[in-house]
Amino acid sequence: MNRNKWRIGCMSAVASLMLLGTSCTKNFEKYNTDPASAYPDQLKADFNDVGGYYPQIQQGIFFNYNFGAGKDWTYQLTQNLNADIFSGYMATRHNFAGGINNTTFFLMDGWNFAAWDYTYSYTMLPIRHAEEKTKNVYPDFYAIAKILKVEVMHRITDQYGPIVYTHYGEGETGGTYDSQEQAYNQFFLDLKEGVSTLETFVQAHPTLNRFSNFDLAYGGDLKQWIKFGNSLRLRLAIRISKVNPDKAKAEAEAAIADPGGMISTNGDNFTISGQGYTNPLGAISPSWQDIQMSANMESILGGYKDPREAKYFVPATDPLAKGAFKGIRSGIPYPDEKTYINHSILNITTETPAILMTAAEVSFLKAEGKLKGWNVGSGTVQQFYEDGVTKSFAQWGAGGVSDYLKSTAVPANYVDLYQPTLLNTNAASTISPMWDDNASDATKLERIITQKWIAGYPEGCEAWAEQRRTGYPKIFKVQKNDSQGVISTDLGVRRLEFSSTEKATNPTGYTQAVQLLGGTDNGATRLWWDKP
C-alpha cells in the first residue's frame, strides 16, 4: 500500500474541503469557503459558478479525488481493499497487517472508514451545493446532480446499509439516517425527477449544450445522461427484486418504457475520464503490484478460454507459470511478501477510463428481468443474454464471440504454484457459456450473472453487490477466516462496518443507523435487499 500522508492543498475553487475527524455534516460552510478563491462573481462566466462542482463529483464515484501525489491510495481504501476483492475479481499478494485483514474477514476500520468518510466529505458536499445553486435556475445542471447523487450514494448504501441521504445537510453535528429501503425509494424518485427534467429541457432547448466543460462522461450530451439515468433505474430495480418484487417490476418497466431510452451501444457506456482524472488501478496494480488477478478470474476465464482474459490481465512473469495467466486465492496465509509478486497484474493504465455502466450490463439486466416475467421489451431471455456477451466482447475488442456462445467449457480447477497442498481446489462452478433453454431458472440465472460478472470487470462495487444478491458467480471460499466466528466462511462478508468517525462524532445517528440495519454492526449482517 502506498503510505503517503494527507496532503492538504488547493482543491476545486468551488468545493475545497478537508473534514478529517468530523462528522459527515459538520462545519460544511466553514471548510467550504476559501476567501482567496475567485468566488462567486468571477465564476459566473460560462457557468463555472455551478459547473465547477461536477468534475469533483464525477471523480468521487470511482474515487480518485486529487489529494496530490499518491492520490491513488484513496481508491485503494474506498474500494480496492474491500469490494474489488470481495467480488472475486482481484486478490493481493501482500501480507497486510501481518496477514490478518479484510481479505481474511478481519474487517479493518483503518481501511473501511474511507468509503464513508471520503464520499461524504468530498462528494456529497459538492452535490448538495450543486443542487442548491441550480434548482429553479439551471434545470439541466440540477437534473445531472440528481442522477449523480444516486450513482454515488447507491454504492455507499450497498457497502454499509443505512445512510444519511434525504436529511443530508440538515444538521450541524450529525445526520438523520434513512433505512436502506427509504434510501432506495428516494433513489427512484430522484432518478425519475432527473430524467424527466432533462427530457423537458432537451425538448425546449434541443441544441443547447452548456455542461460540456464539466462533463467527464458524455461531453455535455444530455440525451446520454437521460439514457444513463434510465439504465441506473433498471439496475436498482433488479437490486431490490427479491425484497420488493412488485416495486422492482414497476420501476424496471417504467425505466425501459421511458422515451429517452437506455444505454444500448458501447458508445453509450458511462465512463469517467479527462480533466486530470487517472484510473487508480493503473497505479495500484502495474506500479505498486499491490493487487493481482484473482484465482476466481483464472478459473473462470481460463476454463472458458475466454478471449477477454488477455484484455483484462497480463500473463504472469513467474517462471513456474510458464507464460500463462495466474491468479491468487484470497484469504490465504502468505509465506512472505514476494511469493506471489510475479502473478498476473491488471491490464489497466492510469489513462484507462473508469468503466461504471455498460450496454452489456443493461442487456444482462433485461435478461434477468425477462426471466422474471417482466415486460422488458421484445426478445427472449437467451437473446438478451447473448446480446450482453456480444456487446462485452465488442467493448473490449475481443474476437470469437460466436464460438464462445456455443462453448460447453466449464471453469478450471485452481492450482497454486507455491502452496498446492493447502490451496489447490476444484472449480467452484460447472456453468458454461452456451445457453440452455431447458435448464432450470436457477441455472439460467447463474449463467446470466456469471457472464454479467465477467463483463462488469473491473467495477468491483457492482460485482460484489450482485454476488451477494444472487450468490453468483460461485467463487472460492477463503482458506483463512480471522473473524473469530462472526463472518461465515461460506457466505463471506455481507457489508462493511460503519465508520469509527461516525460512531465518535454522531453517536445518536449511529445508534439509529444500527436500529435501521436490523442487526449487529458487523460484516455478517445482511443488507435490506440481500435476502437468502
Image (cartoon, grey):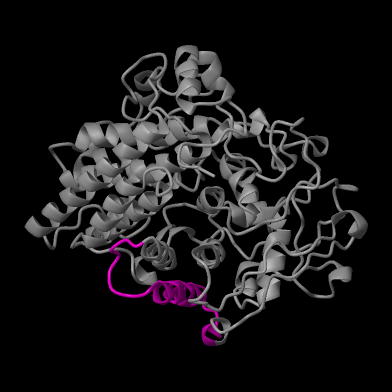
User: Which x, y percent locates residue 344?
Assistant: 74, 64
Between residue 372 and residue 460, name the one nearer to us.
372
**Magenta stretch holds residue 107:** no
Can residue 158 be seen at all in this image of the molecule? yes
Quadrant showing the C terminus? top right
Residue ID at (52%, 86%): 402
- Can you name the residue that lies furthest to the left here? 204
- Examine the rendered structure and indicate whether residue 257 appears above or below residue 380: above
Between residue 183 and residue 485, name the one nearer to us.
485
User: Which x, y percent locates residue 449?
Assistant: 52, 62
- Examine the rendered structure and indicate whether residue 251 appears above or below residue 42: below
Q: Quadrant of residue 271?
A: bottom left
Q: Quadrant of residue 403?
A: bottom right
Quadrant showing the N terminus? top right
Residue ID at (30%, 55%): 252
Is residue 140 left or right of 286 when viewed as pictured? Answer: left
- Looking at the rendering, the stretch of residues picked out in magenta corresponds to 373-402
Between residue 167 and residue 214, name the one nearer to us.
167
Residue ID at (78%, 62%): 343
User: Which x, y percent locates residue 249?
Assistant: 31, 53
- Examine the rendered structure and indicate whether residue 376 appears above or below residue 249: below
Residue ID at (64%, 72%): 309
User: Which x, y percent locates residue 29?
Assistant: 34, 21
Between residue 279 and residue 78, name the one nearer to us.
78
Q: Quadrant of residue 425?
A: bottom right
Is residue 95 left or right of 208 when viewed as pictured? Answer: right
Is residue 91 left or right of 263 when viewed as pictured? Answer: right
Chief SS of the magenta region: helix
Can residue 21 be seen at all in this image of the molecule? no
